Image (cartoon, grey):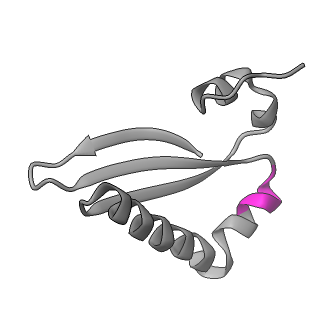
Amino acid sequence: VETEKYVERPDGSVEIYQQILVERDSQRAIVLGKGGSRIKLIGATARKELAELMGVQVHLYLHVKVKAGWDEDRSVYRDMGLDWVE
């Protein structure tokens, strides 16, 4: 998951825009689920957990993107705070 944008609203709530990266189209279909049911469940669950952790209302926007080879991209690991191991 990559965070694209984080915005604090004047009312104290936050907007979080994130991309869920997958390797193949078939994986994208799995994450989305039939009629978007799985991504809705993922979003609702994550939104609730984030709101509890942050103590503010969270507006979470998720996008599933196919990016072949993302798991071999060192910058993805670095952005997550992980070291690349050869």
Residue extending furthest left?
10
Q: Nearer the viewer, residue 20 or 51?
A: 51
Dominant secondary structure, magenta: helix
Residue lying at 58% horizontally and 27% vertically, measured from the top left: 79
Residue extending furthest right?
86
Residue 26 belongs to magenta span: yes
How far across and down, in percent of the image, does residue 20 sit? 61, 50
The quarter of the rendered structure image containing the C terminus is: top right
How far across and down, in percent of the image, does residue 58 sit? 31, 60
How far across and down, in percent of the image, does residue 37 sit? 59, 80
Q: Is residue 49 above or below residue 24?
A: below
Residue lying at 73% horizontally and 66% vertically, measured from the top left: 29
Q: Quadrant of residue 75?
A: top right
14 sits left or right of 73 in the view: left
Q: Quadrant of residue 59?
A: bottom left
Q: Is residue 51 above or below residue 71?
A: below
11 sits left or right of 41 in the view: left
Number of numbered markers: 0
Q: Quadrant of residue 33?
A: bottom right
Residue extending furthest top?
86
Residue lying at 81% horizontally and 51% vertically, measured from the top left: 24
Q: Nearer the viewer, residue 52 or 15?
A: 52
Q: Is residue 26 above or below residue 82?
A: below
Q: Which residues are magenta?
A: 24-28
2 sits left or right of 33 in the view: left
How far across and down, in percent of the image, does residue 49 sit? 44, 66
Residue lying at 72% horizontally and 40% vertically, measured from the top left: 67
